[in-house]
């Protein structure tokens, strides 16, 4: 939908009536906020898929790390990378 077809409110009105504007957006409307008559922002509803909680463990049984992936030397390399271990140790 083009910005020209959307309702525009000025910055002062948006600050004064933000909660009412958000209620309208929750019902599906899109509202443009303007400064000095020029559009600067658009209030739009968040897609429902973005509101669903994330499911953890999506990669379970898809990634396998072998028993030799982390050795004492690997631990030392990681420690050196994070500055916890001097190169001389």
Image: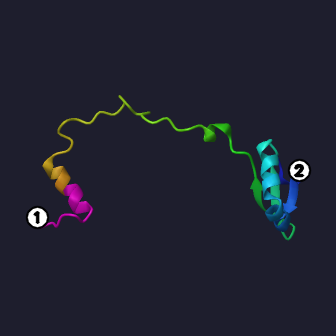
- Report helix, strand or loop for mark 2: helix
At 35% from the left and 28% from the top, the residue drawn is 61
Q: Name the image quarter holding the C terminus.
A: bottom left
Please say if 9 is above or below 30: below
Within 10 Å of disc 1 (Cα), the crowding (few <14, some 14-19, many 20+) is few
Please say if 21 is above or below 88: above
Of residues 26 and 62, the one nearer the viewer is 26
- Estimate the spatial distance between the alpha carbons at disc 1 and disc 2, rounded to whole Å: 68 Å
Q: Which mark is residue 5?
A: 2
Instruction: Write down the residue under mark 1.
Output: 89
Judge left or right: residue 48 versus residue 83: right
- Report helix, strand or loop for mark 1: loop
* Residue 45 x %, y %: 73, 45
Q: Is the magenta stretch mostly helix, strand or loop?
A: loop
Of badges 1 and 2, nearer the viewer stands 1
Is residue 51 on the magenta stretch? no
Of residues 21 and 31, the one nearer the viewer is 21
Q: How is the image coloured?
A: rainbow
């Amino acid at each position: 939908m083009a910005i020209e077809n959307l309702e525009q409110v000025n910055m002062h009105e948006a600050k004064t009536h933000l909660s009412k504007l958000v209620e309208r957006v929750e019902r599906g409307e899109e509202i443009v906020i303007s400064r000095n008559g020029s559009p600067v922002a658009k209030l739009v509803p968040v897609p429902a898929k973005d509101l669903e909680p994330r499911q953890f463990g999506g990669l379970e049984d898809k990634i396998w790390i072998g028993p030799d992936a982390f050795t004492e030397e690997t631990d030392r390399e990681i420690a050196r990378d994070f500055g916890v271990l001097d190169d001389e140790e």
